[in-house]
Image: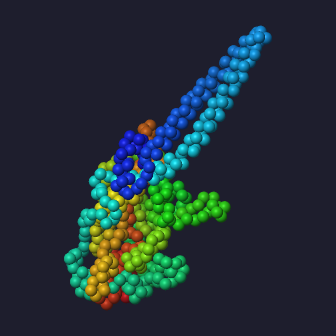
């Protein structure tokens, strides 16, 4: 959620932000509704002040008039009695007026809040302007010694690559037909060494973040209330991509939603809390099962393990003070942690600066990390894919966007400090999402005979196993 005061002070910044991010929000209508609500609230405050004043004056005034009434003539009594009745009725009239204003405000707020939740966080000025992911800009790329970007996989390795689908079938790593039989399209069953490899990368990612980078491991719910999804910015815009559990229809209270990332649970930990500044930054990491509807047409590039409904993900979140320079440094650090992990696995990859049109509603900036996947991309004359990058990570800088929605603040000097509270800043980044990350691992580590070498960094998590097949 954006700062409403900042919107009032500089509406053009937010209008430009909508344009750059390809969002359409009637900001003028929002400002008009906001002005109307503030006018109603101001009128209410005046009436409450008058109500408070009356409560102090009513007793003495009535007492004075009652005294006059005792010695008044028959001709004067009606006038005095009318004054007493008027004074007694005044508080009730004010209460009715205040209640009427409450009703007017309640009619304004739903639309105002709807518009307010729809306004995206304006992108940072140094984010390149663009419409879609096609306009993203490559920042850098890395490959291990011996890999030449100007050559095909076959030219680099000396043999034509098999896809991860072929390799999984060859070694019984994944059972797609039974996955579909149980849960429908885009479902799968990891089996044998496939499941071992999946667990190995998740454990390696968690251990790297906790043992080397100082993150605190946390478990989080993956079935959450709607407010958690709204608070983290995934709703209302992304509701069509989530799975909903209709508890209200079953008489169970609130509807619940399956999360698409551990970020939701990690950010919800401190909702409605005032954090001691001395405890910041908070650095959390979790591994959780994630669910996404992934609505859209199927195709060659979504086949296999690339775009699926259920997966496991190690996610990192940082919550810190409201300091842009610190947020930017955290952003670099978090990408560095992931790059270190990918380099330790020997996976060729690149960093992409996302353009404004690819940021989504909540990000001021986002860097994608994509791994090279030999089975993707166009096919050559022999029908062999030439390879292509596939997204495996996203690192987001959100400033106070989520923390405003979650009412997550900090105060200098701790909870008992005297300073004003300030909304925190937050960031998040994928550490490893599996089984998608298995695609580049399996395909890049395949051998000419179809066997798969287990990356050295993962062998301790597979009981020393060096090869599959």
Q: Can residue 216 be seen here?
A: no
By what rule are the colours in the image chosen? rainbow
- In the rendered structure, the answer to whether residue 113 lies left or right of residue 55 reads left
- In the rendered structure, the answer to whether residue 34 lies left or right of residue 341 reads right
Front in this rendered view, residue 318 or 18: 18
Q: Where is the C terminus found, in terms of image quarters?
A: bottom left
Q: Residue at x 38, y 85 (%)?
A: 167
- Residue 60 screen position, x and y as percent: 67, 18
Q: Residue furthest bottom?
A: 449
- Residue 243 screen position, x and y as percent: 53, 66
- Residue 43 in which image quadrant: top right
- Residue 199 screen position, x and y as percent: 43, 75
- Residue 454 in which image quadrant: bottom left
Q: Residue at x 27, y 86 (%)?
A: 381
Front in this rendered view, residue 206 or 224: 224
- Residue 106 in which image quadrant: top right
270 versus 72 height, above or below: below
Q: Can residue 373 be seen here?
A: yes
- Residue 419 screen position, x and y as percent: 42, 38
Front in this rendered view, residue 148 or 279: 148
- In the rendered structure, the answer to whether residue 270 lies left or right of residue 10 reads right
Q: Residue at x 52, y 33 (%)?
A: 42
Front in this rendered view, residue 293 or 147: 293
128 versus 451 height, above or below: above
Q: Residue at x 58, y 65 (%)?
A: 245
| Count of marks placed on residues | 0
């Amino acid at each position: 959620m954006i700062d409403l005061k900042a919107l009032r002070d500089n509406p053009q910044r937010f209008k430009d932000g909508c344009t750059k991010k390809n969002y359409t929000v009637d900001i003028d209508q929002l400002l008009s509704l906001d002005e109307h609500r503030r006018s109603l609230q101001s009128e209410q405050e005046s009436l409450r002040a008058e109500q408070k004043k009356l409560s102090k004056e009513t007793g003495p005034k009535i007492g004075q008039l009652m005294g006059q009434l005792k010695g008044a003539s028959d001709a004067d009594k009606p006038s005095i009695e009318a004054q007493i009745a008027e004074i007694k009725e005044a508080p009730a009239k004010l209460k009715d007026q205040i209640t009427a204003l409450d009703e007017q405000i309640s009619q304004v707020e739903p639309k105002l809040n709807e518009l307010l939740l729809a306004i995206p966080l304006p992108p940072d000025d140094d984010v390149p302007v663009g419409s879609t992911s096609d306009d993203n800009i490559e920042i850098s790329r890395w490959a291990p010694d011996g890999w030449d970007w100007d050559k095909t996989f076959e030219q680099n390795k000396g043999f034509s690559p098999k896809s991860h689908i072929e390799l999984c079938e060859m070694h019984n790593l994944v059972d797609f037909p039974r996955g579909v039989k149980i849960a429908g399209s885009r479902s799968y069953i990891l089996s044998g060494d496939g499941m071992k490899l999946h667990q190995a990368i998740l454990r390696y990612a968690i251990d790297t973040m906790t043992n080397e980078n100082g993150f605190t491991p946390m478990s989080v719910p993956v079935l959450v209330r709607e407010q958690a999804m709204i608070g983290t910015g995934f709703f209302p815009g992304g509701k069509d991509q989530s799975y909903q559990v209709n508890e209200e229809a079953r008489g169970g209270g609130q509807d619940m939603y399956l999360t698409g990332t551990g970020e939701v649970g990690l950010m919800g930990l401190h909702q409605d809390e005032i954090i001691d500044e001395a405890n910041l930054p908070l650095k959390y990491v979790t591994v959780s099962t994630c669910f996404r509807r992934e609505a859209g047409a199927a195709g060659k590039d979504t086949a296999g393990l690339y775009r699926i409904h259920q997966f496991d993900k190690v996610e990192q979140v940082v919550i810190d003070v409201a300091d842009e320079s610190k947020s930017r440094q955290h952003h670099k650090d978090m990408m560095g942690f992931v790059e270190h992990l990918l380099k330790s696995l020997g996976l060729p990859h690149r960093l992409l600066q996302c353009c404004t049109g690819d940021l989504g509603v909540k990000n001021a900036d986002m860097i994608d990390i994509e791994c090279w996947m030999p089975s993707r991309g166009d096919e050559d004359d022999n029908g062999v894919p030439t390879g292509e990058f596939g997204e495996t990570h996203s690192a987001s800088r959100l400033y106070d966007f989520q923390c405003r929605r979650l009412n997550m603040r900090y105060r200098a000097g701790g909870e008992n400090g005297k300073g004003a509270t300030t909304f925190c800043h937050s960031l998040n980044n994928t550490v490893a999402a599996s089984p998608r990350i298995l695609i580049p691992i399996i395909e890049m580590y395949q051998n000419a005979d179809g066997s798969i070498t287990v990356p050295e960094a993962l062998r301790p998590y597979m009981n020393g196993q060096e090869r599959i097949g």
